[in-house]
Image: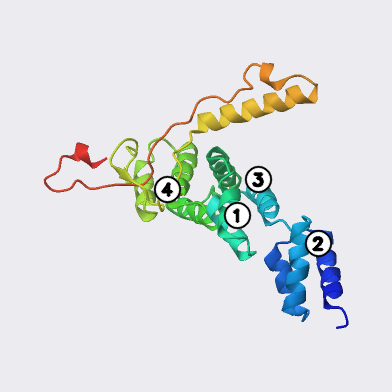
Amino acid sequence: MEDPEAVARGICLRALTGTPKTRKQLADLLAKKDVPDEAAAAVLDRFTEVGLIDDAAFAAAWVSTRQSGRGLARRALSAELRAKGVDGEVAAAAVAEVDPQDEWDSARRLVERKLPSMRRLDRVTAERRLIGMLARKGYGGGLAGYVVREALDGRDEPDDDSAYRAGADSCGGSPDRSDVGEGFVELDPPGTAPVAWSRERSEARAAARASREAAAAVGLDPSGIEGSVEVGEGRARPIGRRRPPTEGMPADDLS
């Protein structure tokens, strides 16, 4: 290799022509092409300096595309960025930009699209499969269980309590419909499960977004359109399994 740096530049430029790449992806590619480490590092440093390599921009674009297009939760997005060699802090900053409301809305859309294929399944099986589908997308057990039970409640007859209890028990959820209020512990790791964002807020938010887009399309100021402003802060409710009362301690003190 007469000029390793020239070879490395050519390889990187060709790789970046199609889609953006992380520094780690390009470094792995250069290693496969037997480019000496010193030449590879020099070229990668130069490309980073001039902005051809920007892991932060890559992470932001990746999160935006994969969250809106594939409905992936923050947990799955973090795992994908780590697999592509993005630094942990950079990945965390990009994932933190995902609005919790968007995550809940995406989970609801995924369930709604899948629900018609579950018509012939009993509630226990449908709930298990839907929660599994959301888990593969990176959603935690608390959020997934809430959204799935919400959708199945709308599908099933109101008096289908026995099937509901069986399904909830099999999936680690609440065994009854009184799962609102105090006395719950989160099933997800601390900091990963947002509050329960209500369907009503999701619908109001979608209507507000549509109003803003319609106003912008005709050249009006979206802020002056009635209903275009974000409405409400959602319905906060801890998610998880009811904690059994501790012996000798009043149940009211278990929040």
- The residue indicated by pointer 4 is 142
For badge 3, the amino acid type reads Ser
**Image quadrant occupied by the N terminus:** bottom right
Residue for point 48% across, 43% down: 147
In the image: residue 108, left or right of residue 219: left
Frontmost of labels 2 and 3 is 2
Q: Which residue is mark 1?
A: 90
Q: Which residue is mark 2?
A: 16
Sequence-wise first label, 4 or 3? 3
Q: CA distance from mark 4 to mark 3?
A: 21 Å
In the rendered view, does 50 fall on the left or right side of 141? Answer: right
- Evaluate whether residue 20 shows in this view: no
The mark found on residue 68 in the picture is 3
Foreground of the two, 127 or 189: 189
Quadrant hosting residue 27 = bottom right
Looking at the image, tell me whether mark 2 or mark 3 is earlier in sequence order.
Answer: 2
Mark 2 residue crowding within 10 angstroms, few (<14) / some (14–19) / many (20+):
some
**Could you tell me the amino acid type at mark 4?**
Gly
Along the line of sight, which residue is nearer the eye, 59 or 192?
Answer: 59
Q: Secondary structure at mark 4?
A: helix
Q: Disc 1 and disc 3: Cα gap in Å?
A: 20 Å
Q: CA distance from mark 4 to mark 1?
A: 27 Å
Label located before the other in sequence (1 or 3)? 3
- SS at circle 3: helix
Q: Earlier in the sequence, mark 4 or mark 2?
A: 2
Q: CA distance from mark 2 to mark 3?
A: 24 Å
Front label number (2 vs 1): 1
Instruction: Tell me if mark 1 has few (under 14), some (14-19) or many (20+) residues whose alpha carbon lies within 10 angstroms of its own.
Output: some
Q: Are marks 2 and 3 in contact (CB under 8 Å)?
A: no
Residue 204: x, y in percent?
57, 27
Q: Which mark is residue 237?
A: none
